[in-house]
């Protein structure tokens, strides 16, 4: 016994590799699912934002991005969004993670958007 295994030939390997590459290309672009997820989280986070003037809540937006869902609060006119959310102990500002709390509370809803989009991409792949 030489320790060498007999060569294995897989039928349809080229088609499988092509199908996996098609799926990978589709999964790289989950903009619709990212937009849906961001919108869901934004809808929960906006009313949970601390309110004095309402400018923090009004500054919230969900961006359509290819690689991630973005929910952003703050702007040049609302520069205090990050310290409010994450806290600033040196200034005595306690964290109020209203966006991450909203993301956790709505996970079952936005996860469904990803499941639908991924399934759609996989259904569109030929040869599987």
Image (spheres, rainbow, N blue to C red):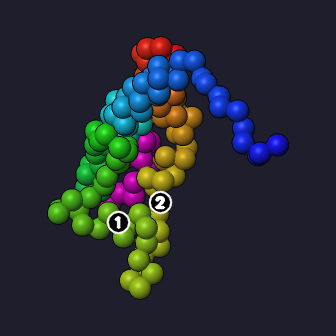
Determine whether, in the image, residue 66 is placed left or right of residue 98.
Answer: left
Numbered range of the magenta stretch: 40-52
What label sits on residue 82 in the rendered view? 1
Image position of 107 with respect to 122: above or below: below
Residue drawn at x 51%, y 28% is 115
What label sits on residue 97 in the rendered view? 2
Q: Position of residue 64 (x, y in %)?
A: 28, 39
Residue drawn at x 17%, y 62% is 77
User: Extreme right residue here?
Assistant: 1
Q: Position of residue 67 (x, y in %)?
A: 35, 43
Q: Quadrant of residue 66?
A: top left
Q: Position of residue 17 (x, y in %)?
A: 47, 27
Please say whether residue 42 is one of the residues in the magenta stretch: yes
Q: Main secondary structure of the magenta part?
A: helix
Residue drawn at x 76%, y 46% is 3
Please say whether residue 61 is one of the residues in the magenta stretch: no
Determine whether, in the image, residue 20 is placed left or right of residue 29.
Answer: right
Image position of 14 with respect to 72: above or below: above
Cα separation, mark 2 vs mark 1, equals 9 Å
Q: Quadrant of residue 75?
A: bottom left
């Amino acid at each position: 016994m030489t320790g060498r295994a007999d060569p294995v030939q897989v039928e349809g390997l080229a088609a499988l590799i092509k199908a996996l590459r098609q799926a990978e290309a589709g999964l790289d672009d989950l903009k619709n699912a990212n937009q849906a997820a961001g919108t869901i989280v934004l809808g929960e986070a906006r009313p949970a934002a601390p309110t004095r003037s309402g400018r923090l809540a009004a500054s919230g937006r969900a961006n359509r991005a290819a690689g991630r869902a973005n929910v952003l609060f703050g702007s040049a006119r609302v520069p205090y969004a990050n310290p409010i959310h994450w806290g600033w102990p040196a200034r005595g500002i306690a964290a109020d993670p209203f966006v991450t709390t909203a993301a956790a509370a709505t996970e079952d809803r936005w996860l469904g958007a990803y499941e639908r989009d991924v399934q759609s991409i996989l259904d569109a792949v030929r040869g599987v």
